[in-house]
Amino acid sequence: MTMKSNRGPGGQVVVITGAGNGIGAETARRLVAHGHHVGLLDRDEKAVRAMESELGARSIAIVADVTDAASLTSALAAVADHFGGIDVIVANAGISGPGATVESIDPQEFERVVDINLLGVWRTVRAALPFVRERRGYVLAVASIAAVIPCPTMPAYAASKAGVEQFTRALRMELADTGIAVGTAYFGAIDTPMVARMRNEPGLNRLLDRLGFAGRPVPVGRAAQAIVRGIEHRHRIVYAPSYVPALLALRSVLAWTDPLLARLPAIRELVREAAAVTGDPR
């Protein structure tokens, strides 16, 4: 039986993880401005409650952790009960983790990044699918250009985002006959608290500098605008900044440059510095 919705005309019910700040928060603001309803999920209770106060009756804030499947199941049921259903899930929650090499990173930190960035997406989507299926809705998982370009000293982040990309490709094929659309979001450096924390850590700051234009943050509103457009048009690929499609198109060519890039003095220096780095920049 399809759930009855109490949405306004043309509005959708969109659930966003990591909605307390950054891309998630700005996306929620723009969705409400477009007449949609938003379920705000975040483990930071203070931040997510503040967003609910700002956005008013078109929003509901629920404390949930993407590493806890039970909390996600409960949170999504609460949103569906409050608004009458769920049309869209945006699996956005993620962390950068420390800047360190494969050898120097604390194993628990590596696995924590994967747990949040990749397994968190899996848990979120898995819990949301029964609701989204009722509405023949839309699933959007946030990956990164790190799924496409090499990211020495950020192995856990790059691996997790590449995993998100492949997860969504598989999901899209599995759901092809259900009416559910699946999108992947590829973002470069966005002006968010996470990128600001990366800039405060010398090794990660150098990595962003080495990426040139790809490492220069763009306003968070550009990513949020891309997500809103993706939701409203059920886009398969969502991206910001504008150069991202070129990276996606040239990925096989760029892969051939890995051995050359690895020998650059700047990259060798970056790896040497990161070899001694431990800890979490959050």
Image: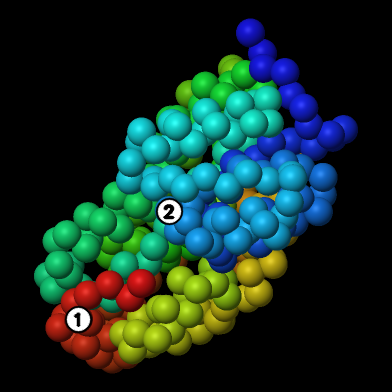
Label 1 crowd (10 A; few <14 / some 14-19 / many >=20):
some
Residue 248: horizontal and vertical position, in percent? 54, 57
> What residue do we see at 50% from left, 84% from top?
212
Q: CA distance from mark 2 to mark 1?
A: 27 Å
Residue designated by label 1: 277
Residue 84: horizontal and vertical position, in percent? 68, 25
> Does the image show residue 249?
no
> What residue do we see at 45% from left, 58% from top?
44
Q: Earlier in the sequence, mark 2 or mark 1?
A: 2
Looking at the figure, which quarter contains the C terminus?
bottom left
Kind of residue sitting beneath label 1: Val
| Residue, far top | 1
Relative placement, left or right, of 275 versus 209 is: left
Quarter of the view holding residue 158: bottom left
| Residue, far right | 9
Q: Nearer the viewer, residue 234 or 70?
A: 70
> What residue do we see at 48% from left, 80% from top?
196
Q: Nearer the viewer, residue 36 or 114?
A: 36
**Is residue 38 shown above or below 281?**
above
Q: Give the structural element (helix, strand or loop) at label 1.
A: loop
Q: Give the structural element (helix, strand or loop) at label 2.
A: loop
Residue designated by label 2: 43
Q: Nearer the viewer, residue 60 or 76?
A: 60
Kind of residue sitting beneath label 2: Arg
